[in-house]
Amino acid sequence: MLRFLLGSNSLRSKVRSSASLSSCRFISQQSGTSAVKDVGELELPPFDYVPRIYKGPSADEVLQKRKKFLGPSLFYYYQKPLNIVEGKMQYLFDENGRRYLDAFAGIVTVSCGHCHPDIVQAIRTQNELLQHATTIYLHHAIGDFAEALASKMPGNLKVVYFVNSGSEANELATLMARLYSGNHDMISLRNAYHGGSAGTMGLTALSSWKYNISQGGVHHVLNPNTYRGVFGSDGEQYAKDVKDHIDFGSSGRVAGFIAETIQGVGGAVELAPGYLPAVYKYIRNAGGVCIADEVQTGFGRTGSHYWGFETQGVIPDIVTMAKGIGNGLPLGAVVTTPEIASVLAERIQFNTFGGNPVCSAGGLAVLKVLDKEKRQEHCAAVGSYLLDRLRALQEKHEVIGDVRGRGLMIGVELVTDRKLKTPAKAETSILFEKLKDLGVLIGKGGYESNVFRVKPPMCFTKEDADFLVDAMDYAMSGL
């Protein structure tokens, strides 16, 4: 049975019946072992937690209400969407009490783990004292959080602005860049995602995420994709395209450049080595500022570094962040230098909810948990182990074209032909459903939606990694 260490026979029976596909004895597997586990051998690692008995509306009822009262642009995963009602650390539970391994962390948002007790307690304590006041009054929480966050930044990145999302953060960063430089044109990468607001949609370069509205003043340059790009791993060659856009697509002066170090929505694409140092030089020579979008890569997720941009050996002028900064709270931030920050003082710049006491208390708790539990080091160790196992799986299954990433920021690209690198769109959809049935919730990305995004909560273990890879192996063996 699925081992919840349950406290009652009735609940134990309920969970057993709803989790039959994940029922079995879990066996650890070393990298390179070729035997495929039978479905009866796939079991989630033991977890000492009893989910509450759910008494709310069913999945069908929730879906009908959502369709009736929420916008039609909302989409959901899976042919029969899951009704997720509870979460604990790296696991989620549906309405029937079935446990799933969360390998996507609420779209790379749950950094410390679902309902981490330290964070829940910090939020609860502040919530009982003061929920909201805005920055027109003094409150220690926002200053304490800003100080802790600034201490994590290199160079002179010491001034913090708090917002509520990654889109807001990138929009504010773009405003700063244009005001400070006195220029208008921005440069971003093809295949990038920087938000869905009217102001950030121009920076995003995936047509499926863009409406047909005015998005002028943004140039999209070659994506330095080492798997599909025209220059392979030569970062400096890709960087020359930035120089060409400055010389031939602009006045010769630009406001700034923005990039994710590992593209998230675009399919976990890590920038080619040496790319950012060359680009930053071109941008600064053209009067612009360099922005690092750390919405998904920040806070130690890459394992090797606390910030993604550090993997390229650069220091940006502005850094944006969200998602993992709040472990699920609506929280984002922009960190920059005092000189760049000063341009916003020319007018009134205000954010009603940015840095509110509850989110600030929760955000500070996140930073403390990440340090106390050494999550960066953990991501390095577990991520390395998981990458080794996935690369061994790649040798076995032709459908895996590429395995890439760092730490717990990993992409598995599926293809029907390794030589032509033809996206395996249909196969990805089939495997996506099979993995859910086996108890693994994973993300999809890339323009063709043929990349599995493996970006779990940072408490994800080697035992979880084994279960994930064994489930992939079983599902792929059935294609």
Image (tube, grey):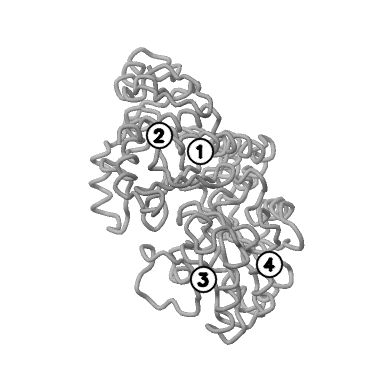
Q: Mark 4 = which residue?
A: 317
**Label 4 crowding class (10 Å Cα cut-off): few <14, some 14-19, many 20+?**
many
Quadrant occupied by the C terminus = top left
**Amino acid carrying mark 3 in the image:** Val
**Amino acid carrying mark 1 in the image:** Arg
Q: How many marks?
A: 4
Q: Picture quarter containing residue 332?
A: bottom right
Give the mark nearer the N terminus: 3 vs 2: 3
* 422 horizontally vs 303: left or right: left
**Amino acid carrying mark 4 in the image:** Asp
Q: Mark 2 = which residue?
A: 472
Q: Mark 3 = which residue?
A: 221
Is disc 3 in contact with disc 4, using a CB cutoff of under 8 Å? no
**Label 1 crowding class (10 Å Cα cut-off): few <14, some 14-19, many 20+?**
some
Quadrant occupied by the N terminus = top left
Secondary structure under tag 3 reads strand
- Spatial CA distance of label 4 from label 2 is 41 Å
Give the mark nearer the N terminus: 4 vs 2: 4
| Residue in the image at 55% along x and 47% along y | 405
Secondary structure under tag 4 reads loop
Give the mark nearer the N terminus: 1 vs 3: 3
- Spatial CA distance of label 1 from label 2 is 12 Å
Kindly identify which numbered label has been placed on residue 391.
1
